[in-house]
Image (cartoon, helix red, strand yellow):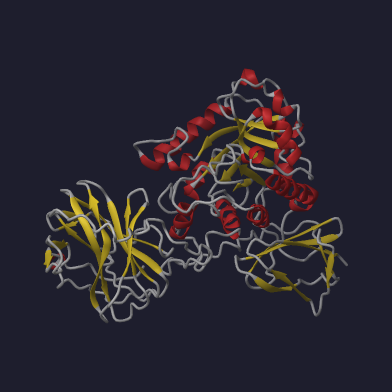
Amino acid sequence: MAGTAAVALAALTMSTLAPAPQAAYAEETVFSDATTPQLITDPDSNAVELGVTFSSDVDITVTGIRFYKGPENTGEHVGSLWDSSRNLLSRVTFADETESGWQEASFDTPVPVDAGETLVAAYSAPDGLYSADTQGFDAPITDGTVTFPEGAGVYTYREGRFPSRNFENSNYYVDVVYTTDPVPPVDPTTPPVDPTTPPVDPTTPPVDPTTPPVDPTTPPVDPTNPPSGAVLDLQREPWWGGPSYYAKFPKANAAGWDDPSFFPISVFFGKPEHAATLANLGVNTYMGAEHDGSSVSTMTDEGISLIAQPEWSPAELGDDPRVVGWHIGDECDMGLGGCDSAEGEYGSLAIGQRQAAEARSHNDGRFLQANFGNGVLGSYWSPETMDDHLAYVDVSSVDKYAYTSTHVQDLLPGSPFWPAGKNPAAASTYGWLQDRMETFSSPAGSKPNWVFVEAAKPYLTEEGATSISGDQLEGAVWNGIIHGAAGIAYFQHNNSGCGNYALLDCGAALQNKVRSVDAKVKSLAPVINTQSYVWNFGPQLETSLKTQGGSAYIFAMTDGSTGTRSFTLPAGLTGNVEVVGEGRTIAVTNGTFTDSFPNEFTHHVYRIALS
């Protein structure tokens, strides 16, 4: 969000509006009609929702919304009123707007607001070019009744959705029209405003243009790490070493985790009695397991490994070789999992380090694993300590449910590392998460990280939350793998209505999809578990290039867009292209070939015989 000057607070005074002839109450606003922004037109031309957070010292009734409009702020403007739980209370379309100045629209039904209740008033600017002053809310602004607190200005680049992001305490010149007088009842013949949020296309949200884009698809390459024994004369990407990494942990080594054909496919906190069904779907690991009185053998006898949380005692785990690790924490980077500390992120870090030290004290040949959350963004949560968190574990994972959580979709563009123009609700987000996690290990990418994928609706309650589709699940898995994920974790806990354990309760279609995805991952594990080469096949592609068994393999998806893509091959790849598992071959002409990606979640695996 741009904007260069603080608002002159002296100009922000209460204004009493002349009531409409039918009104029997006086209306007030916080900003006066004389208040004008210093930056009338911000150069940001993306569609955006702009708002202000407010509360009142006394009971009031909000009758409408105002916003300041510059002459270039065009398009249809819609005002919305939300409560602090993101529930839409009312919505109105602005009509009869002037070219510039304060615009006002009244709700069909005034909205009563209790004293002390926090709400958000907002309007949509479909063409951007809105008015904004940074530092405008460095201090609260009040008219004596209604208060806009410090940092009151909020926005989101998801038009029509709840705005929650803050940029340098900007003031977007949104105001409320309210009264403290009694409001007569609404004529019952007037239909009430539909409080539901109209559908918003989640597939093309613009991204904050003031966030400097960082390309997450080209991690740094270690020039001192040449492709030993390589058949392609290309540098290699940073790498954690593949399954041989686990040979140094006796339990994982005994369980076969050092096998080049083993790729971890886990379920988070599964129920032990479900082990046989999960194994049938291709799950080979429990990342945590419900401590419900079952024995460890309930899982391990089905050939499934366990990464046990501390609820399981060393005595319960015994010497079972399939208990390969300790799951020591969940989202300590966010102060969760027992890591809440008054000392902030450094206090949380100290707790995580103590948890790790306790697990290592068992000296039982098991690796340490922990899951992380919003710290991956590099913004508010643990901006200085994520590398320290990864330093105390041997294996990490990350969970951000980009397909299903509107809250996550709003959070992601707030990361200073989020690339401009990227759609959060897409498979390519899961690879971006992997790329970000690689930056926190030293050297970069030197520890295995697993990517979480939701299996249904992962305990979400915010407005607009959805269940993931089978095709989206498949795309998320493969995008994570393309970007270097060393494992996949399914979060199957679910509140969509079909049952708590989605992989057990939500039908044959989901089971068949997961079984198919897992089978393909397993079949390609010997390829996935090799080090990738550095090569750019062309624009709007996300790819991984590997060699194994006399062939080169290209794992490919788009950057979240769709359509036909052209691939430029490196020297040494000249034969025709077999599309693995699809029963077709593509001709190569002058070192290039093309293929179609009809959906953002479409993925292809190509095999080319090495000359």
Residue 212 x/y as whole percent: 45, 67
In this picture, residue 546 sits left or right of residue 365 = right
* Location of the N terminus (image quadrant): bottom left
Q: Nearer the viewer, residue 298 or 83?
A: 83
The residue at 71%/37% (across/down) is: 278
Asked if one can make out residue 174 in the rendered structure from this viewpoint, the answer is no
User: Is 353 placed above or below 81 here?
Assistant: above
The image shows a total of numbered marks equal to 0
In this picture, residue 103 sits left or right of residue 200 = left
Residue 494 x/y as whole percent: 56, 41
Q: Quadrant of residue 346?
A: top left
Q: Nearer the viewer, residue 175 or 128?
A: 175
Q: Nearer the viewer, residue 325 or 165?
A: 165
User: Is 376 placed above or below 275 here?
Assistant: below
Q: Nearer the viewer, residue 251 or 205?
A: 205
Residue lying at the far front of the rendered structure:
189
